[in-house]
């Protein structure tokens, strides 16, 4: 009798994980599904953004990275991209954001399908040379992490109408709200999530990237 109980217990331990995986994949798909944002792009229309129909995609852009090379929307195609907004003269909040992005980058350092893109909100001061000096000083010169700058109106338009974020524009920098700093974009240039720079939000972002990688 004792051997029979041990055999039954061992069988349960072997079979249960298989059953659990089958159950989650069969019945838990919706629970772990990552949403696609702005499937009805007509809602984005405003005094700044032209009317759209159907699914919203990140539109065309043409910025310059810290090496002086042009970077377009094609950079986003086929990969998961974590997009952040910063400026090199921002101190505490941007440093906190960059520290969390370094942690995220470390989680996907060897994953070719994940990359980071940081867009300057102070393009008038953040020249390519300034961005290069900034990333070297802060230890942010990492593979698959681009820092870009561009013409101020183009950056404002992309933030508002591309990444669908509110912003406050001043005579110098473009200030994005602290609670909307990160955007996850998939390989089809669709927005899949918005996140803050808080640690728990970055943990959520890391988890959702892993889920999307598994779906691929």
Image (cartoon, rainbow, N blue to C red):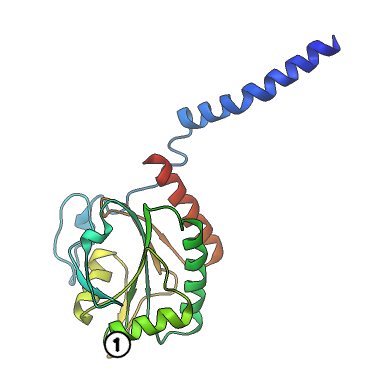
Tell me which residue sits at (32%, 71%) in the image. 166
Q: Quadrant of residue 182?
A: bottom left
> In this rendering, is residue 27 above or below 149?
above
Q: Quadrant of residue 58?
A: bottom left
Q: Position of residue 140 (x, y in %)?
A: 44, 74
In front of the other: 185 or 127: 127
Q: Is residue 55 visible?
A: yes
Q: Is residue 156 visible?
A: no
Which residue is farthest bottom? Answer: 171
Which residue is farthest right? Answer: 2
Q: Quadrant of the C terminus?
A: top left
In front of the other: 76 or 129: 129
Tally of marks: 1
Tell me which residue sits at (52%, 75%) in the image. 96
Q: Which residue is mark 1?
A: 170
Tell me which residue sits at (80%, 14%) in the image. 5
Tell me which residue sits at (82%, 12%) in the image. 3
Q: Position of residue 168 (x, y in %)?
A: 32, 80
Residue count near mark 1 (Cα–Cα under 10 Å), binned few <14, some 14–19, many ≥20: few
Q: Position of residue 169 (x, y in %)?
A: 29, 83
> In this rendering, is residue 21 above or below 48?
above
Secondary structure beneath dot 1 equals loop
Q: Quadrant of the N terminus?
A: top right
Is 35 displayed left or right of 104 in the figure?
left
> In this rendering, is residue 99 above or below 17?
below
Q: Position of residue 132 (x, y in %)?
A: 36, 81
């Amino acid at each position: 009798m004792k051997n029979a109980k041990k055999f039954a217990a061992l069988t349960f331990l072997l079979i249960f994980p298989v059953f659990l995986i089958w159950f989650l994949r069969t019945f838990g798909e919706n629970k772990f599904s990552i949403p696609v944002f702005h499937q009805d792009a007509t809602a984005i229309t405003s005094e700044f953004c032209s009317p759209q129909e159907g699914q919203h995609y990140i539109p065309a852009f043409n910025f310059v990275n810290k090496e002086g090379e042009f970077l377009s929307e094609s950079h986003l195609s086929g990969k998961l991209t974590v997009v952040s907004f910063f400026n090199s003269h921002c101190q505490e909040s941007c440093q906190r954001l960059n520290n969390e992005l370094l942690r995220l980058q470390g989680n996907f350092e060897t994953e070719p399908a994940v990359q980071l893109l940081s867009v300057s909100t102070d393009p008038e001061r953040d020249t390519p040379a300034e961005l290069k000096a900034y990333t070297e000083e802060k230890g942010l010169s990492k593979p698959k992490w681009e820092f870009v700058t561009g013409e101020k109106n183009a950056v404002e338009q992309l933030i508002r109408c591309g990444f669908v974020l509110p912003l406050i524009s001043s005579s110098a920098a473009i200030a994005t709200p602290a609670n909307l700093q990160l955007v996850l974009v998939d390989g089809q240039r669709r927005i899949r999530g918005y996140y803050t720079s808080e640690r728990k939000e970055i943990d959520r972002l890391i988890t959702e990237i892993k889920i999307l990688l598994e779906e691929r």
